[in-house]
Amino acid sequence: MSRPKGSKNQQAIATPDTVSFSVEERIKFIADLIADRIAEDEADGFPLLKKIQEAENAPRQQTA
């Protein structure tokens, strides 16, 4: 079976390397991401915080 025309020159899709973190490193990494996102939200006038507060105050629907 022949390959599709032009497929010879295509590069393979890159796969990301796996990174191993200790438990402490994972916690710090996630905490840094959260802190960065909070600072970004603060700089933008807290749109994310407002959305969260609106969602908390919205009436909840009960499911059967």
Image (spheres, helix red, strand yellow):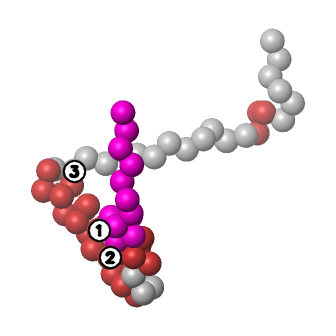
Q: CA distance from mark 3 to mark 1?
A: 17 Å
- In-front residue for pair 52/15: 52
Could you tell me which residue is drawn at 67 percent across and 41 percent down?
Answer: 11
Alpha carbons under labels 3 and 2: distance apart: 23 Å
Q: Position of residue 48 (x, y in %)?
A: 41, 73
User: Mark 2 touching mark 1, by CB under 8 A?
Assistant: yes
From what the image shows, is residue 20 above or below residue 57? above
- Residue 2 in magenta stretch: no
**Mark number, residue 21:** 3
Q: In this orientation, which residue lies closer to the viewer: 61 or 37?
A: 61
Image quadrant holding the C terminus, namely: top left
Q: CA distance from mark 2 to mark 1?
A: 6 Å
Label count reads: 3
Q: Which residue is mark 1?
A: 34
Mark 1, other Cα within 10 Å: few <14 / some 14–19 / many ≥20: few
> Which residue is rendered at x = 19% and y = 63% of the image?
28
Q: Quadrant of residue 35?
A: bottom left
Which element type, helix, strand or loop, lies under badge 3? loop
Left or right: residue 28 versus residue 58 is left
Q: Residues within 10 Å of mark 3 (few under 14, many from 20)?
A: few
Question: Which quarter of the figure has residue 36?
Answer: bottom left
Query: Which amino acid type is marked by label 1?
Result: Ile
Q: Quadrant of the N terminus?
A: top right
Q: Which residue in the rendered view is the most extreme toward the left?
A: 24
Name which residue lies at 16% across and 50% down: 22
Q: What mark, if any, has residue 26 been given in the picture?
A: none
In terms of secondary structure, where does tag 1 sit?
helix
Amino acid type of the residue that numbered disc 2 sits on in the rendered structure: Ile
Q: Earlier in the sequence, mark 3 or mark 1?
A: 3
| Amino acid type for the residue under numbered disc 3 | Phe
Q: Position of residue 13 (x, y in %)?
A: 60, 41
